[in-house]
Image (cartoon, rainbow, N blue to C red):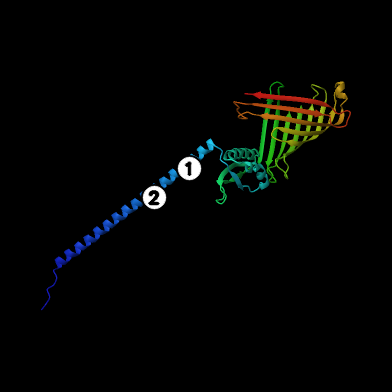
Amino acid sequence: MAQPEDDPVVRNHNNDDDDDDDEEEEEEGEQNDDVEDEGEEEEEDKDLESQKAKLRNRFQNFFSRIQNESVPIRVHDVVIKGNTKTKDSLIEAETALLKDASTIQELFAASSDVNLRLQALEIFDSVKITLDSGPTELPGTANVIVDVVETRSPLLGEIGVFNKGEASSSTLEGTLKYKNIFGYGDLWDGALAYDCGHKAEMSAGVFLPRFKGLVTPVTARLFLQSQDCLKFSSFKERSLGLSLGLFSTRKHDLVCNLAWRTLTDPSRMASSSIRRQLGHGLLSSLKYTFKIDRRNSPLRPTNGFAFVSTTQIGGLAPDSRCLRFLRQVWFSFHV
């Protein structure tokens, strides 16, 4: 007996119902996935906010502790970066005081002082000092990272004309500097000054802030000077000399000057004291400078004072014709 065939209409309705059920289940699954994703995102946002809040509280507590009490710390290492030409020994000498700090406050002050010292060398375009935590196995320590950017243009030139109102004359001055040739922070310069036929001077010098472990900077300058005083004192002077820095610190400077001088009297009208010094002679002197600067700013001070005292002793050469003198000059400034 033949089996009755399935009703095609009924069969199609059943298939449609199954498809609808599958679509509903898929939509419900997607909605559930969206809800789960939103829940995970909310949890992640909450975790991120809680981490930010904890970090913010830690910083607030840290800065509050710094302001209210001394926080002991020890510098574990000083890392120098960015120097390609400058010797490490030069930067290490300028940053040596960082390792003497025993508290966070002292380390901040030492970092500021080191930044100013490195900027004063005039061989870096920028200096950046970062304080980082030390090794985990050494609690209470910090690493100091000194990142420098060496100057791109080591050659610097300046020229200018200066008018003297009282003397009704002008002076032409020019300088040319070359920085850090050998990587020791050395500064080489040449200078020229001309004063309308009355005075002319050429000089060349070198400045070494730290050289071969020396405590004080090394300064030397060779000069050639010609001066025409016929209008006022009836003589001409020409001297070739050397100026050598013997000792230099923040408050003290000691300089030795040596010059071979030639004095002439073309008009034959000079005084007897000038005539006794005519001819060749060796000029020698020691110049000592003592300075104190307690101003809050060297450019625009609003508080503090500054004091400079200069003592110069001349006539150290064993020559009876050598000019011997003692000169004392001082200057003070109060705000």
Q: Is residue 147 visible?
A: no
On residue 44, which mark appears?
2
Answer above or below: position of 140 versus 222.
below
- As drawn, the residue found furthest toward the bottom would be 1
Residue at the spot x=24%, y=58% of the render?
24
**At 82% across and 26% down in the image, what residue appears?**
325
Could you say whether the residue bearing mark 2 is in a helix, strand or loop?
helix
Amino acid at dot 2: Glu
Q: Quadrant of residue 236?
A: top right
* Left or right of residue 132, residue 208 in this image: right
Of residue 35 and residue 208, the one placed in the foreground of this image is: 35
Asked which secondary structure carries label 1, the reply is: helix
Q: Residues within 10 Å of mark 2 (few under 14, many from 20)?
A: few
Image quadrant occupied by the N terminus: bottom left
- Disc 1 to disc 2, C-alpha distance: 21 Å
Viewer-closest of 98 and 246: 98
The amino acid pointed to by label 1 is Arg
Say which of marks 1 and 2 sits in front.
1
**312 lies above or below 119:** above
Q: Position of residue 50 (x, y in %)?
A: 41, 45
Label located before the other in sequence (1 or 2): 2
Please determine whether, in this image, residue 129 is positioned above or below residue 259. below
- Do we see residue 26 in this rendering? yes
Q: Residue 288, located in which quarter of the rendered image?
A: top right
Image quarter where the C terminus lies is: top right
Residue 195 percent location from the top left of the image: 73, 28
Horizontal and vertical percent for residue 12? 17, 65
Question: Looking at the rendered structure, which numbered label has been put on residue 58?
Answer: 1
